[in-house]
Image: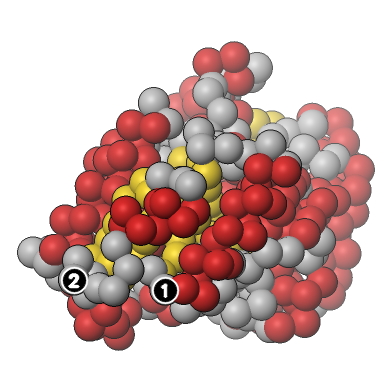
Amino acid sequence: MPQNITVVIIDSDLTSLNNITRFIESLGDSVSIEGTAPTFEKGYELVHKKRPMVVIMEIGSDVNLAIERIEQILSRFPQVSIFATSEDKSSETILRVMRAGATEYLLRPVSQTDLTFALQKIGRLWLVKPVEEEAGRIITVFSPKGGAGVTTIAINVATNIHQMTGKSTVLVDLDLNAGDVTTFLNMKPAYTISDVTMNISRLDRNFLQGVIAKHESGISVLAEPQKLEEGVSISSSEIKKVLSLLKSMYKYIIIDAETISERTAIAIEMSDLILLVFILSLPSIKNMQRHLKYFDRIGLGKDRVKLVANRYLKKGDITIQDTEKALNYPIFFALPNEYDTAMMCLNKGVPISEGAPRSQLNQSLKELTKMVVQSQS
């Protein structure tokens, strides 16, 4: 495994090229420049000859031509990470360039901070030792019917896990037709899971890392599709590839899953733990009976499938004991009915630990998270 990052720079602007060169040289032996070129043709020859890890490439006014050139490099050298540099700030151009395969999009004039951060990400990915890696744990939060509070639970379990363990945590919105994780977190990510699946043939760590957004809580977020037709087109095989790669990148992968589908089934099959969320009502309990039978048929038992009763009222008509008896299945955890608290935090776009830290709901979510982490230790 290489111990330094090798770079080729393609830039027609001599001042820009010199600045980038100076920035890289200031990083010492961890990064080395294998060559520079003022034209794409000469740059492509350098890439062919030197086989660098990174190509820092100027995007001119002709975006279509730039995209063709990115695709040309990647079709021949798929392991190369391309840093596109451009003065164009439009989200449309950024998205097109990233979809073409660029790992990073750096605004010109390129700042030393942005370039250093991008190279550090590449360095972490290249220098990691696979033999020392432990596969991440997939925890799926799922309910047979919408409106049970799955997204609230998934978001808060994810943020609490990261806070408690300090381990890398990614939240994946797999409600591909009606997901709203980013709404709950007040995020406007540039890319979504659709951008990943539309480029599934060249999926790798570098590309996936470039698409995933970062939330201020410290967790990463792979956002839901923004268009209905994009979500419909995503296949279960694509989901499997994405989740498999995420297991090699993150310690905890928390999934907010849609109601049962082929895609949900794949996530459930790959999960180390399934939190099956429901409300204590007769229709919901009847639904649980059907789904628990389904999980039993596919070989998922009490060690992996845990029942979580949400919006539980201690003085309600249906008790925990009655429910466990009817289902012949233990309830792993019961969250109190603080619907107003959850809605207040949703409207603020913050996790409950931030929006209502003293609430009983927050304390219960933290206790649930502790039990989840302990079950995966």
Residue type pointed to by label 2: Lys
Is residue 30 rendered to the left or right of residue 244?
left
Asked if disc 2 and disc 1 are in contact, CB closer than 8 Å, the reply is no
Question: Which residue occupies 31% across, 57% down?
Answer: 320
- Visible in this render: residue 190? no
Residue 273: image x %, image y %?
51, 41
Secondary structure beneath label 2? loop
Residue 281, numbered label:
1
- Residue that mark 2 sits on: 315
Foreground residue among 81 and 269: 269
Residue 344: image x %, image y %?
23, 82
Q: In which quadrant is the C terminus drawn?
A: top left
Question: Which residue occupies 60% across, 34% down?
Answer: 248
The tally of labels here is 2
Secondary structure beneath label 1? loop
Q: Which of marks 2 and 1 is nearer the N terminus?
A: 1
- Visible in this render: residue 142? yes
Q: In which quadrant is the N terminus drawn?
A: top right
Is residue 21 rendered to the left or right of residue 39?
left
Residue type pointed to by label 1: Ser
Question: Which residue occupies 58% across, 37% down?
Answer: 301
Question: Which residue occupies 73% across, 34% down?
Answer: 52
Foreground residue among 213 and 221: 221
Is residue 208 rendered to the left or right of residue 213?
right
CA distance for labels 2 and 1: 13 Å
Residue 148 vertical placement versus 227 (above, below): above
Residue 256: image x %, image y %?
52, 61
Crowding near pointer 1: few (<14 within 10 Å), some, many (20+)? some
Residue 67: image x %, image y %?
81, 66
**Colour scheme of the rendered structure:** secondary structure
- Farthest-out residue, left: 358
